[in-house]
Amino acid sequence: FLVTTADIPEDTVLFSIPRSAIINTETSDLPKRIPQVFETTGLEDTDNEADEDGSETSGPPDNWISLILIMIYEYLQGDRSRWKPYFDVLPNQFETLMWWSDQELSELQASSIVSKIGKDEADGMFRTRVLPVINEHANVFYPEGSQRLNEDQLMLLAHRMGSTIMAYAFDLENEDEEPENDEEWVEDKEGTLMMGMVPMADILNADAEFNAHVNHGEDSLTVTTLRPIPAGTEVLNYYGPLGNGDLLRRYGYVTRKHSRYDVTEISWDLILSVLKDTLRLDEAVWGKAVNELDLEEIEDAFVIERDSGEPNSKGEFQDEPAFKELPSDLVDQLHTLLKEIRKISPASIPDKSIRDEITLSVIHRALELRLAQYPTSQVYDLDLLSGNKVSGRQSMAVTVRWGEKVLLQEAINFAQDKVLKLKSKADPGAEPFAKRQRTR
């Protein structure tokens, strides 16, 4: 991290890194030594992360694999690499979820972030796209007289470099590529044309409110202050509007300010279960309606999130986060299914108002069940955190799961309010649809 020792004015250049010092496909010798591997490199990996399917075995490397190969190559060169001093200060231990034990991961409870770690996918990618290149060109990767690594050692090194890239790599923007909207922040990991490791720039920590920005120039990357920074203040970069779960998965830490961007997911299977229990349809009617849905168009999960706004030009929050709407894709998909049900059984959904009431009631109940999947309560988790009863990885896990529970409760309250307003507007004396169904 970097802390100021004196007051620094706004728009001050803190330091610059020449592009020639960045580790990437243009500065490393590796692409020149084995050009056949890097030819027509497919720099189309939009999220600059490990592909979900690690089974692909042919074709040029994308920019994620390219940088892993380069990092392994430069690391194995030892003193022969001009980036040796940089490798000497890079971490060899990580707090990212990839390195957690099953017991540690269990502290995340029902968080959907656990399913996004992708360790098996990364293992598959390394075994099919990285290790074969190293083994085939061992005379290039290993300096003369150096000891060669076995498969387990190579896999560990690949994971280490992958985690280093995940946590510290920058997407390198072209200097003549202007953002579509100058008022919008572009995260440093937006998935542009090329990834690179930027010495010095990666010493900056990041938070949801920040005071410095990395500007991508023609010949260098320049770190500039966005507002006056008092002495004794940490210089902070911006990684984007990430919830604590994703922040922990990618970078290995959580922050209080990132909690405004917390997200969780609700599965379509849970929605279907609640809807089926609510409507109590004949199995034949239910099966026929569900089978009418286009499987290729069906979403398996839906993101629950707040309207959190964008930081202003000084890197500060402008508005308080608020839960303002249910996922539109979930509402639309549920409406599509209800439309199919009405075609088969019109009496089940006599009009649009009943359809809307069913939609909101089902989502409300599904959110309650989603919250119940976490074995501990918000109150319990908050007591652990506020009483400093947990530390390290357990504390970070509790922070993630607590934030998701807070968000789910906000969504539950929002959906419940919508149900009550719709009910009172339709018929102030009517019972909720779900209750009417149960008492038939």
Image (tube, rainbow, N blue to C red):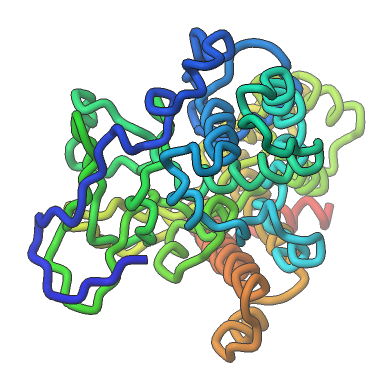
Residue found farthest to the bottom: 387
Residue found farthest to the front: 145
Q: Is residue 154 above or below residue 405?
A: above
Is residue 432 among the parts visible in the rendering?
no
Residue found farthest to the right: 283
Give residue 135's quadrant in the image: top right
Viewer-closest of 56 and 37 = 37
Is residue 96 among the parts visible in the rendering?
yes
Is 88 positioned to the left or the right of 239 in the image? right
Q: Position of residue 229 (x, y in %)?
A: 17, 69
Q: Position of residue 132 (x, y in %)?
A: 73, 22
Is 388 positioned to the left or the right of 372 in the image? left
Is 430 positioned to the left or the right of 70 in the image? right
Is 146 positioned to the left or the right of 210 in the image? right
The residue shown at (77%, 23%) is: 344
Q: Position of residue 176 (x, y in %)?
A: 19, 23
The residue shown at (73%, 53%) is: 434
Q: Position of residue 374 (x, y in %)?
A: 73, 66
